[in-house]
Image (cartoon, helix red, strand yellow):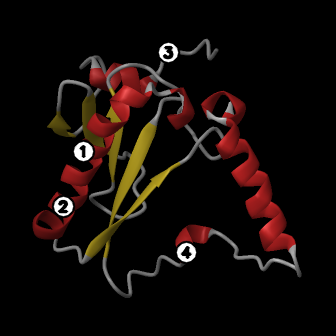
Amino acid sequence: MNERPCVFCAVVAGESAGEVVLERRGEVAFLDARPVFKGHVLVVTRQHVETLTDLPAGQLPGLFEAVQQVAAAVRPALGAQGSFVAVNNTVSQSVPHLHVHVVPRTKGDGLRGFFWPRHRYDDGEMREYADRLRAVLMAGPSAAR
């Protein structure tokens, strides 16, 4: 467990400055202080949960309803043509509090695959990876932890 106070919990509690754009019973959305593009929003859970896999399944609908609301708002509010929605789990998660990025997008904005290199599967590798994932998924939720 992280010993430092959670900066997102501080924003949620009103103890730290944040440009809040949406408040719901279980979620809060605010502008990212270091945006990919201006208007980049972080949708967080009010409850401190570190990753998506830690979130109780019953709270998923509320979180993604909030994400959907924000994604719908960036078009008319910011003149965006769409949005990029992403969640990091542990790797590349700069704040260990579950958050979903909603980044406004327009054609020609310069974002190329969100900086991810692309790879190809070798012969038979795609099936092997799919088989490994299917085996864990078919075993049930406890096997995926």
Q: Nearer the viewer, mark 2 or mark 3?
A: 2
Marks 2 and 1: CB-CB under 8 Å? no
Q: CA distance from mark 4 to mark 1?
A: 25 Å
Residue type at the position of mark 1: Glu
Q: CA distance from mark 2 to mark 1?
A: 10 Å
Q: Locate residue 84: give its quadrant.
A: bottom left
Q: Nearer the viewer, mark 3 or mark 4?
A: 4
Residue marked by disc 2:
72
At x 31%, y 79%, the residue is: 106
Q: Please provide percent x and percent y for residue 68.
A: 25, 53
Within 10 Å of disc 1 (Cα), the crowding (few <14, some 14-19, many 20+) is few
Residue type at the position of mark 4: Gly
Residue type at the position of mark 3: Pro
Q: Please provide percent x and percent y for residue 51.
A: 54, 33
Q: Is residue 18 visible?
A: no
Q: Please provide percent x and percent y for residue 58.
A: 36, 27
State the SS at label 3: loop
Position above or below: 6 against 137: above
At x 64%, y 38%, the residue is: 90
Q: Please provide percent x and percent y for residue 12.
A: 29, 24
Q: CA distance from mark 2 to mark 3?
A: 32 Å
Residue marked by disc 4:
113
Q: Earlier in the sequence, mark 2 or mark 1?
A: 1
* Quarter that holds the N terminus: top right
Q: Earlier in the sequence, mark 4 or mark 1?
A: 1
Within 10 Å of disc 4 (Cα), the crowding (few <14, some 14-19, many 20+) is few
Residue most toward the bottom? Answer: 108
Q: CA distance from mark 3 to mark 4?
A: 33 Å
Q: Earlier in the sequence, mark 1 or mark 3?
A: 3
- Mark identifier at residue 65: 1
